Structure formats: structure tokens, C-alpha cells
Image (cartoon, rainbow, N blue to C red):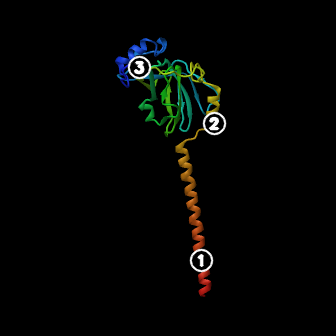
Amino acid sequence: MQEHSGFLTRKSIQPLIASGLITADTYDVRCLGPWSYDLRLGKEVYISSERTLRALGEGDSIVIQPGEFALLTTWEKLSIPLSHAAFISLKISYALRGLVNVSGFHVDPGFRGHLVFSVYNAGPRPAVMRRGDRVFMIILADLDGESEGRPAESSFQDLIQLKSEWIASLQGPPVSLVALNRMFEKVSWKVNFLISIVSALIIALVASLLSLRLG
């Protein structure tokens, strides 16, 4: 049984990369940090307001409008050892723009393939990114032994392209929190205005009845 050492640093990640953690054709040494690896935006994306998948060429960009969901794939193809688990997240620079990761936050031991992120733009402005941008990050931790691994029949295992059922579940118009707030404020203003009118009418009616009664 191996000694448990928790989260891995660059020194421990490098041998895993050499043994196939990230396929050689998708690895970039510039993405390797002191204790994490930056994952880049891959070729295939889907944005909820669009009807079709988009295949990104070199230098191509996407725009995720406020209120939109998107499925994003990583450029890197991973193979997580059975003796390790991984944790994933958006990089802070994109989180500060209002993007929220609404998919999972971990990668199972034994996972193979490109990762898929489901994100939502909860911010007030469009989020723009290009193919190859460092959008995500992955942190590795070793286990106190080997796991049984991810089931071979898993729909995420050896993923080559986004699945049609995932796309269908996201299709629809944007649901912007900012727009909803503006609609709520507009409706609230109308309701308050109507309440003011009704209150004024009631006061006028009561005053009229009192004047008739006193007269």
C-alpha cells in the first residue's frame, strides 16, 4: 500500500504525465503549475441558444451571453490512474466574469477521455474565450490504494464528442439573472403604482362618504 500524501505538487505530477496522465499530443508544459495543471478549451462546444454544435478551428472564439448555458470540452485528453482522483474547477479569471461551473467538481480514478464542463453565465456581460485558452484547472490527489475505477459503460468514458441528449437538455432561450431582476423591478414598480392609485381611490371614496354623512 502506498503512503498517502494528499494533493500532488509539480514534482509528483510530472511522472504521471510521463506515464500517460495527459496524452502527448494534447500536453503543454506551459500549463503545468506548482500544484495544478491548466486545462484548455477544446474543439467542440455547444451554447444553449444555438441549434447546432460548434467545432472550433485554431483561433476561433465563442461568446456565452448572460443567461446562457454552454457545454465546453477540454483540449487535453486525460487518463487518471486508479491510484489517484482529481478535482476540477474554472480558473478564477473566468469565475470573476460570472461563469459558474454547474457540472461535477471531481474526476473518478480510471477516467479516460476529454472532460466536459457545463457552465452558466450568471454575470451581466458576455464571456468570451478562444480555443486553446486556459479556462479550467485540475488538481490531483493520490489514494491510499487502487480504486476499482470508473465503470467501462459510463457515458463519460472515452468521450470523443458531446452527446445529443446533453445538447437537447440545454436547448432554450437565455435565462439571465440580471434580466429577471430587471423584470421583477419593472413588475414591482407597476404593482406599487397600482396600489398607490387604488389607495388614493379608497381614501377619496371614504372621504366622500364621510362628507355626505356629516352633511
Question: Which residue has dot 3 on it?
Answer: 31
Question: Which residue has dot 2 on it?
Answer: 172
Q: Position of residue 43 (x, y in %)?
A: 55, 20
Question: 71 or 12: which is nearer to us?
Answer: 12
What label does residue 206 carry, if any?
1
Q: Residue at x 63, y 33 (%)?
A: 169
- Where is the C terminus found, in terms of image quarters? bottom right
Q: Residue furthest front?
A: 1
Amino acid type assigned to the residue bearing label 3 in the image: Cys
Q: Circle 1: is it few (<14), some (14-19), or many (20+) Cα within 10 Å?
A: few
Q: Position of residue 33 (x, y in %)?
A: 37, 21
SS class, disc 2: loop
Q: Is residue 57 above or below residue 101?
A: above
Q: Residue at x 57, y 23 (%)?
A: 156
SS class, disc 3: helix
Q: Circle 3: is it few (<14), some (14-19), or many (20+) Cα within 10 Å?
A: few
Q: Position of residue 183 (x, y in %)?
A: 57, 49
Q: Quadrant of residue 84?
A: top left
Q: Circle 2: is it few (<14), some (14-19), or many (20+) Cα within 10 Å?
A: some
Tell me the CA gap for discs 3 and 2: 35 Å
Q: Position of residue 120 (x, y in %)?
A: 53, 35
Amino acid type assigned to the residue bearing label 1 in the image: Val
Q: Quadrant of residue 138?
A: top left
Question: 116 or 55: which is nearer to us?
Answer: 116
Mark 1 or mark 2: which is in front?
2
Looking at the image, tell me whether mark 1 or mark 3 is earlier in sequence order: 3
